[in-house]
């Protein structure tokens, strides 16, 4: 999808995202908290700088702030309209176009949530390299993506206007691209298995990362 098209979706993105996922959990914040908790569990609480690559309108920023209170949080996105909304909703964070962030090691963590399926396959290695170059040695990249093995996820993607350009990535592709970009200790786990109606089963999620039935998966890698 072009930059202008994401600009067009900026004002409706938050409502569309929460409508599309309400069958799973009516509290959209659940998804951001879930991801931020994974980041905190794997990186510890003392993270000084986070970049949210492809932050969009900033829906993932408040849960990051909740998990990392003293941290510098930067969001980048090609869509100016999205960045303007993100800025208004999180004045204690910084938002800019990707090109404004120098290619030097400066972040402890980079997150990219539902971004890479919007990047054409031929540009994905360069985008991962972009993240790699901005991480400090020992820094973590987390890519959260829709699980193409889950039929319900594929159905939701197929009917979502924002996803009309989506080309989903299998975990195997994402892992291979991480390794090509230079990341070490690359690991993938499926996540988001149980809707709110089955919330009593959510404590089991951490032991099910191998099961390709989660709504999403994430790949984590470390810059050597
Ligand atoms: C589905 S939205 C996800 C936004 C946000 N990460 C979230 O979870 O709410 C995908 C975002 O990826 C951004 N995007 C698309 N291509 C990109 C690229 N090459 N580099 C960085 N961001 C990109 C879009 O502008 C859009 O805001």
Image: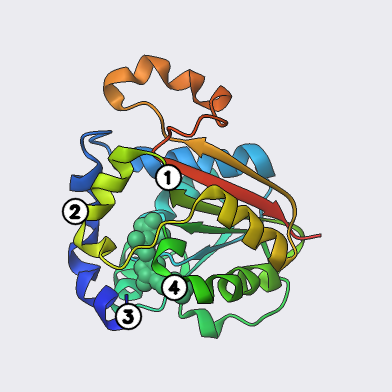
Measuring from the top left, give residue 206's x and y in whole percent. 55, 26
Residue plotted at (24% across, 47% down): 156
Mark 4 vs mark 1: which is more N-terminal? Answer: 4
The quadrant where residue 119 appears: bottom left
Q: Residues within 10 Å of mark 3 (few under 14, many from 20)?
A: few
Q: Residues within 10 Å of mark 4 (few under 14, many from 20)?
A: few
Label 3 secondary element = loop
Measuring from the top left, give residue 59's x and y in whole percent. 35, 55
Whole-Å distance between the Cαs marked 2 and 4? 20 Å
Which disc, if any, is residue 120? 4
Which disc, if any, is residue 67? none
> In this figure, which residue is indicated by the disc labeled 2?
159
Label 1 secondary element = loop
Give the side of residue 79 with respect to residue 36, left or right: left
Measuring from the top left, give residue 196's x and y in whole percent. 29, 25
Label 2 secondary element = helix
> In this figure, which residue is indicated by the disc labeled 3?
2
Q: Residues within 10 Å of mark 2 (few under 14, many from 20)?
A: few
Whole-Å distance between the Cαs marked 2 and 3? 19 Å
The coloring applied to the image is rainbow
Whole-Å distance between the Cαs marked 3 and 1? 23 Å
Q: Is mark 3 within 8 Å of ligand 1?
A: no
Q: Residue furthest top?
A: 200
The reply to whether residue 68 is in sight is no
């Amino acid at each position: 999808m072009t930059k202008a098209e994401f600009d067009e979706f900026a004002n409706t993105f938050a409502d569309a995202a929460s409508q599309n996922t309400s069958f799973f959990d009516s509290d959209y914040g659940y998804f951001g908290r879930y991801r931020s908790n994974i980041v905190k569990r794997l990186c510890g609480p003392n993270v000084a700088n986070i970049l949210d690559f492809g932050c969009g309108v900033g829906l993932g920023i408040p849960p990051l702030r909740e998990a990392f209170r003293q941290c510098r949080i930067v969001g980048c996105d090609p869509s100016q309209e999205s960045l303007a909304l993100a800025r208004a909703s999180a004045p204690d964070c910084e938002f800019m176009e990707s090109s404004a962030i120098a290619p030097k090691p400066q972040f402890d963590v980079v997150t990219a949530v539902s971004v890479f399926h919007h990047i054409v396959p031929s540009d994905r290695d360069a985008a991962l390299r972009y993240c790699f170059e901005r991480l400090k040695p020992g820094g973590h990249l987390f890519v959260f993506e829709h699980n193409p093995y889950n039929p319900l996820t594929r159905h939701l993607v197929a009917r979502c206007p924002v996803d009309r350009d989506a080309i989903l990535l299998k975990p195997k592709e994402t892992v291979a691209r991480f390794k090509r970009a230079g990341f070490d200790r690359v690991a993938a786990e499926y996540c988001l298995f149980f809707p709110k109606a089955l919330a009593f089963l959510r404590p089991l999620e951490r032991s099910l990362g191998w099961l390709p039935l989660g709504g999403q998966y994430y790949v984590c890698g470390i810059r050597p």
